[in-house]
Image (cartoon, rainbow, N blue to C red):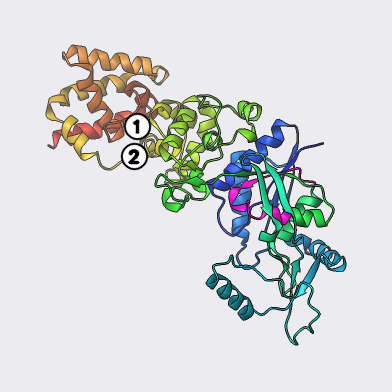
């Protein structure tokens, strides 16, 4: 048997991290067992589905590297198939038309609640011989078995049993003829040969209903694994205030895709005390049966820590285009030199996100009009004027071919020793002069990357600033 899993988001909003984790688990399971991973867009909610949401899903999957073997399939392209299945169920007496008006259903619900009963459809039209009322477009309901129970082994939650008497006859087609979620999901899983359904546990109550429809159609049942939800630090369901934003916003904020995947894999799953996983390790070690049954808590600090680790350990050539995108988003025009890869390498130890790296790298590509006030007040003072002047002269005389960190460092040391300065007393004013602030990579590397002409120009500007004090 070839394992076939699927990710089936609804394009009614952004692709959030809960959905991404489900997609990741489905993708890993298929990859681990040499199976196939299918992407299905469940867009039958015509009022709420948008093309923008579809594109956000596709772009998010591409950014994360969660490639699919088949798809994307769109449910709206399969309406004829759904209608044919509904007709088969009607013809076999496994479904029926229900003419209950909305007001009748609401009254039924109120009476059941008053009797402290579970609200549910009472099955009035299930075997009714009554004449259908004029002018009423009926819905179609599935004839759920009235006896016995549905038993299935959830790969995460364990054995689950539900009495059929607890399940009412759910609607499988609306009055306008459009199929409902529980019908379309069943038909698609059956037609696509899905062997393992890995999805959020908010769907666990749908599973017994879907199993009964699958049995009615004579389909092979898939195995189910319901992934517990993700909570915020306050124990509430994850929302925007906790960080449940579009996955593409994590890209915009400068997170690396592998860092996000690594974090989401560890959110409710573990392999001993290991925290860092390569993609190959994820595929090799992941077991869906090892996913924790309890809900997980989203920790943005942990995600940021992982992201910083991957920034430090990712080749600067791979970081370069990401840094370029971030700088462009911040309005900085990148005209090399310095090479983006060199800047990324210099800044890697100091950035938690690529957005932060870009924010700290403006001075490499754009001149600044003002100094950081505190940094200038502390470092650009009269007592360093002569030292900065001498350093400016030495750096201006340094040939372009020798404009390298080692030679720059030697010149800084030479001026400091000649004036009996501690290195920091000269290096920090130099840093403020050429970057505008008190923070940068090592000053010799920083000056090399800024380049000779721009460094000298900025030093001359700093000398004029100090002289005017």
205 drawn magenta? yes
Q: Nearer the viewer, residue 445 or 69?
A: 69
Q: Residues within 10 Å of mark 2 (few under 14, many from 20)?
A: few
For residue 133, side relative to residue 459 (left or right): right
Q: Callout 1 environment at 10 Å: few (<14), some (14 to 19), or many (20+)?
A: some
Q: Residue furthest bottom?
A: 134
Q: Please tell me the numbered disc located at residue 454.
A: 1
| Residue at (57% x, 51% y) in the render | 15
Q: Please state if 272 lies on the left or on the right of 384 as rendered.
A: right
Name the residue beneath numbered marker 2. 367
Front position in the image: 433 or 80: 80
Query: As drawn, is 440 to the left or to the right of 196?
Result: left
Which region shows up in magenta?
193-210
In this view, the residue farthest toward the right is: 91
Nearest the viewer among 345 and 62 is 62
Task: Tell me which residue sits at (51%, 33%) in the image.
Answer: 320
The C terminus, quarter of image? top left
Where residue 308 appears, as percent x and y from the top left, is 44, 31
Q: Residue at x 37, y 15 (%)?
A: 406
Give the answer, above or below, for where 147 lies relative to 196: below
Closest to the observer, 214 or 371: 214
**Image: 392 above or below 294:** above
Q: Are marks 2 and 1 in contact (CB under 8 Å)?
A: yes
Magenta stretch: includes residue 45: no
Residue 368: image quadrant is top left
- Per the image, label 2 sits on a secondary structure element best described as loop
- Vertical position of residue 443 compared to residue 457: above or below: above
């Amino acid at each position: 048997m070839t394992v076939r899993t699927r990710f089936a988001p609804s394009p009614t909003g952004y692709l959030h991290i809960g959905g991404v984790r489900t997609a990741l688990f489905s993708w890993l399971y298929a990859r681990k067992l040499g199976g196939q991973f299918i992407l299905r867009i469940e867009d039958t909610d015509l009022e709420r589905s948008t093309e923008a949401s579809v594109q956000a899903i596709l772009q998010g999957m591409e950014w994360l590297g969660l490639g699919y073997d088949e798809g994307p399939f769109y449910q709206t392209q399969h309406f004829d198939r759904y209608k044919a299945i509904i007709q088969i169920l009607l013809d076999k007496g496994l479904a029926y038309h229900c003419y209950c008006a909305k007001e009748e259903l609401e009254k039924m619900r109120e009476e059941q609640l008053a009797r402290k009963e579970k609200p549910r459809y009472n099955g009035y039209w299930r075997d009714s011989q009554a004449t259908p009322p004029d002018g009423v477009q009926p819905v179609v309901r599935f004839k759920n078995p009235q006896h016995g129970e549905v038993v299935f082994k959830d790969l995460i939650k364990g054995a689950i049993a539900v009495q059929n008497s607890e399940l009412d006859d759910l609607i499988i087609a609306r009055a306008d003829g459009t199929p409902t979620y529980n019908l379309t999901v069943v038909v698609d899983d059956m037609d696509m040969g899905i062997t393992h359904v890995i999805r959020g546990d908010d769907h666990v109550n749908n599973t017994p209903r879907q199993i009964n429809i699958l049995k009615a159609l004579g389909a092979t049942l898939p195995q189910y694994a319901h992934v517990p939800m993700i909570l915020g630090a306050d124990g509430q369901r994850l929302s925007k205030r906790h960080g449940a934003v579009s996955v593409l916003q994590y890209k915009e904020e400068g997170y690396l895709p592998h860092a996000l995947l690594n974090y989401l894999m560890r959110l409710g799953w573990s392999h001993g005390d290991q925290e860092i996983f390569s993609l190959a390790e994820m595929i090799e070690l992941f077991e869906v049966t090892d996913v924790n049954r309890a809900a997980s808590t989203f920790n943005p600090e942990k995600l940021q820590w992982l992201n910083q680790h991957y920034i430090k350990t990712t080749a600067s050539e791979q970081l370069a285009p990401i840094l370029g995108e971030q700088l462009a988003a911040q309005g900085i025009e990148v005209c090399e030199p310095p090479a983006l890869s060199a800047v990324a390498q210099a800044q890697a130890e100091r950035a938690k996100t690529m957005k932060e790296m870009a924010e700290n790298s403006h001075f490499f590509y754009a001149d600044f009009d003002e100094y950081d006030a505190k940094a200038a007040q502390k470092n650009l003072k009269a007592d360093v004027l002569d030292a900065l002047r001498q350093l400016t002269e030495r750096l201006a005389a340094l040939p372009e071919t020798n404009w390298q960190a080692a030679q720059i460092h030697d010149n800084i040391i030479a001026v400091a020793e000649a004036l009996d300065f501690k290195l920091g007393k000269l290096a920090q004013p130099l840093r403020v002069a050429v970057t505008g602030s008190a923070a940068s990579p090592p000053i010799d590397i920083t000056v090399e990357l800024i380049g000779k002409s721009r460094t000298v120009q900025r030093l001359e500007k700093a000398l004029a600033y100090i002289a005017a004090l």
